Image: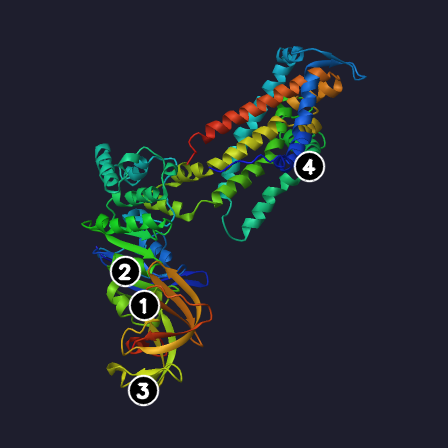
Amino acid sequence: MSLILKDVVKRVGAETHIHPVSLELVPEGFNILLGTTLSGKTTLMQLMAGLEHPTSGEVWFGGKNVTGVSVQKRNVSMVHQQFINYPNFSVYENIASPLRVTRMARGEVDDRVREIAGLLQLSPMLERRPNQLSGGQQQRTALARALVKDADLVLLDEPLANLDFKLREELRDELPKLFAGRNCTVVYATTEPSEALLLGGNTATLHEGRVTQFGATANLYRQPGDLLSAQVFSDPPINVATVRKRGARFQLSEHVSWPAPKQHKALSDGPYTIGMRPHLISPVRASKAAVEIEGDVLITELSGSESVIHFDLGQQTWISQSHGIHQYEVGERVAFYADLAQSMYFDREGKRL
Amino acid sequence: MANKTENQKAWLFVLPVVLLVAFNALIPLMTVVNYSVQETFGDNVFFWEGVKWFEQVLNSERFHAALLRQFAFTGTILAIEIPLGIAIALTMPRKGPWVPVCLVLMALPLLIPWNVVGAMWNIFALPETGLLGKVINGMGIDYNFTQQPVAAWLTTVLMDVWHWTSLVVLLAYAGLCAIPDAYYQAAKIDGAGGWAVFRYIQLPKLKRVLTIAVLLRFMDSFMIYTEPFVLTGGGPGNTTTFLSIDLVKVALGQFDLGPAAAMSLIYFLIVLLVCWVFYTLMMRNEEA
């Protein structure tokens, strides 16, 4: 069953938390809400769940208007960033809790709880209490509670954010398998672009209570419709600069210019904005088409096999993300290479050209 | 393996704490222990008596009566203040302009000195002139806390509830504010009702603060002295003579320092034992 939001708005007092949002979320794959903290992901999820009701607009689910229907009547389940379980229930009772209110037969409850617990590798700890579990196991318990009742809509609100690195990867790999074959619509909120890319499905980018774009995750990453979506969906942040078109060339500064690519030749002269992902900029010249840009190094972050270099380009800071170890002193003047012709071009309103 | 070097200077760093604890706990306690095993007639002349005073106190009916009264009082006020405190905390707003108002109103009784509370309630409850006394008598109920044991008890309990429920309210309120909204949302999604939310989310989450609240109220009420002393003076008869009041009567009224010291120690051990048992029971399942 798909979930459809039609011009949903949420206002609290004088503040608008959600500007008109229209989305159609489908039961295949993950529907990802990607945005920074306070971009409205959680509010949007609460509106989807029925925990909050929209100020205006409609929520449709499975062909029915459920705008005013309370959460209890919607067959929804939710996993939060914090590990939310009943503190004095055992893992078993926690997983069974959503079924208890449905007055399901004892034997069936038992079968279901044991099946889900097996799926989430919780079988050996069914008798323990949440405070005797690791963070990963607590979140697995919360996930089991969300899965056990065969909800039509499952909302995962940054479920991996409080887990440490290893557990996060492990659980992230399992998530798509857990939901495969279940006929439910899954919504997954995250702040991390890489998580969205790994989970695939569809992504909606959120910025200050607005959905800036919605579409297949990989497409959205490669072809953002506007500057905001590109910025939300880039980590490290996408490099942005104002450039000028003069005749057949784009100009970044007096010394840096490049021929306009075919599809943009017809644009009128004037200022434009370009966006360039950091991994396309390197201190090593990779192709003949690359343009040389000089900058003063601000920070060099070295990971095992990769260098992230922040450098000052005069009016703004740019970031280069490249393979290999490139170490520079702070303040050192370094030449970077980027095929600027391949960057994304935006008009002055931020629309992708 | 690292070689440990002996460095006696380390003692210097512990010294301040040792001195502090000595002056503030050990020396006074040992003085009491000293009195409890000896007989003195003044002039710093002491005779060894062993456990005679302890036997005397433990066998005295007067002590038994005071102890029973004490447990009855403490049990009564705990049974009222803890549920009442939780109930008030549950009704207090979590956000908005009324929060500071409620908090200040709640904190007010806690700011009033004990003897003033006693005096206030004495004046308030006097049958002839006090507002409370006059109103109750005006309703046709015969009420005189200076003469009727039941009235004296009720007034003392009421005074303590008025004075100390706020402490429970503030602790429970702080505990409630610490519960993330996500718990309530999860309960809502599960279809849990108000009682279930209280029983399975709020109460377990409040366990730690409530343990502290019960311990504080137990210790304070078990050692209560000033308020009933000012209100009733332990009367009528001995009906509101709690342990502390009895202890002061023995120590300063009759100047029986030996029995008074033995009584203090027994009293102290009871408080310690009850607190330990209670705390251990509450924290049984808490190790994470």
Which one is nearer the viewer's eye here, A163 or A286?
A: A286
Which dot, 4 or 3, sits closer to the camera?
3
Looking at the rendering, which quadrant does residue A119 occupy?
top left
Is label 4 in a helix, a strand or a loop? loop
Element carrying mark 3: loop
Report the disc number at residue A268: 3
- To which chain does the residue with label 3 belong? A
Indicate the amino acid at tag 1: His
Marks 2, 3: nearer the viewer: 2
Residue drawn at x 61%, y 36% is B10
Circle 1 or circle 4, nearest the eye: 1
Task: Kindly identify which residue carries mark 1.
Answer: A279
Q: Quadrant of the N terminus of chain A?
A: bottom left
Tag 1's secondary structure?
helix
Both labels 4 and 3 in a single chain: no
Q: Chain of mark 4?
A: B
Q: Residue at x 32, y 79 (%)?
A: A291
Q: Are marks 2 and 1 on the same chain?
A: yes
- Chain that bears disc 1: A
Q: Mark 2 falls on what kind of element? A: helix
Q: CA distance from mark 2 to mark 1?
A: 16 Å
